[in-house]
Every structure is written in C-alpha cells, then in structure tokens.
Amino acid sequence: MTDETLSTELQYATVSENVAGTPTPITTWDVPEGIAISIAQGSPAILDVEAKDGGNVSRSTKIGFGYREPNDPLDSWTVISEFAVSPFNTLSLKDQQSGENAQRRRVRFLRDRVPNGQLTLEDADELALLVNGPDVVDPATLFFNYPMQVDNR
C-alpha cells in the first residue's frame, strides 16, 4: 500500500453541483479497476469551497463522506461521517496545510457504519463528498484533500 491523497484533482474524481437543502455529492470518486483505496478516521481534511452566488458557504452547511457499492441504488449513499463547514470558512488553504487548527478539521467516522475506523473500497465502489446545506456550491472553486492508502491489485 502506498500513501496518497484523496483529492478533487484525481483522474477518477467527478466534481458536480449540489442541490440546496438535499444531501448531494459534490465530488464522487469511482474506484478504478485493479486498485483499492482505504481511508481512516482521525486525519484533518483540507477544504476550500465557495457558494455559487459568491462568498462563503453557510455556516450551517454539513459535509461528509458517503459510499455506495455497485448494486446500491443510484441515489442511495451510506453516510459514514459528517462535519461542519465552518472551520474551513475561517481558515485559508495555507493555514489548513500548516497543521495548526487541525483538531477542528479531523474527520470522524460514524461508529455504527465503520466500526474499526477504516473504510476500504475496491474497484466499482464509489466514495463521495456529500454536502447538505442551504447553498449551492460552486464546483469550480472546490478543493478537497484527505489522506488515503492505495493498494494495486
């Protein structure tokens, strides 16, 4: 396994616009054939995003990870984490990358959905960054990074 970064800039990432007021993926990673990716809780996420009409996304907005397997319904995501957007609104990307204020940006998984704190997804599984809030986010402004491990199979 190699340490890599789950990012909106990966070749197999699809960034899209959300529907305000509805939990919607803003980034979907479709795990390519022949690899498996693992993400573990406890690391700080790095996020930069703006509302489509400009400015910060509402502080009441929630963001989180969800996944689905090949036979799951297209609109069905198993949510495994949820965190507030507010810590990201107040910090620049540079400040987020410095490691300071990391505690407020650490991702925790829902214990009943990921009991061991680590999720491994294989080819054809999908992982999504979901958003639920009153604003439509501007996909062109979205930047997201989170540590992952990749296993070529």
Image (cartoon, grey):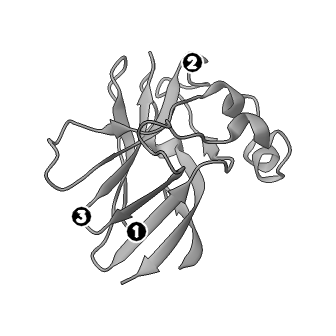
Please say whether residue 54 is visible from this viewpoint. Answer: yes
- Of labels 1 and 2, earlier in sequence is 1
- Checking the image for residue 124, the label placed there is 3
> Tag 1, which secondary structure?
loop
In the rendered image, residue 18, in percent from the top left (x then y), is placed at 35, 32
From the viewer's perspective, tell me whether residue 54 is left or right of residue 90. left
Who's the residue at 43% across and 36% down the image? 112
**Mark 2 — residue?**
58
Total residue callouts: 3
From the viewer's perspective, tell me whether residue 114 is left or right of residue 145. left
- Of labels 3 and 1, earlier in sequence is 1
Who's the residue at 32% across and 39% down the image? 78
- Distance between the alpha carbons at the discs numbered 2 and 3: 33 Å
**Amino acid of disc 3:** Ala
Q: Quadrant of the C terminus?
A: bottom left
> Tag 2, which secondary structure?
loop
In the rendered image, residue 30, in percent from the top left (x then y), is placed at 31, 60
Of badges 3 and 1, the one in the foreground is 3
Who's the residue at 45% across and 78% down the image? 151
Q: Residues within 10 Å of mark 1 (few under 14, many from 20)?
A: few
Q: Residues within 10 Å of mark 3 (few under 14, many from 20)?
A: some
Q: Nearer the viewer, residue 140 or 131?
A: 131
- Checking the image for residue 11, the label placed there is 1
**Amino acid of disc 1:** Gln
- Of labels 2 and 3, earlier in sequence is 2
Of badges 2 and 3, the one in the foreground is 3
Vertical order, 153 against 16 (above or below) = below
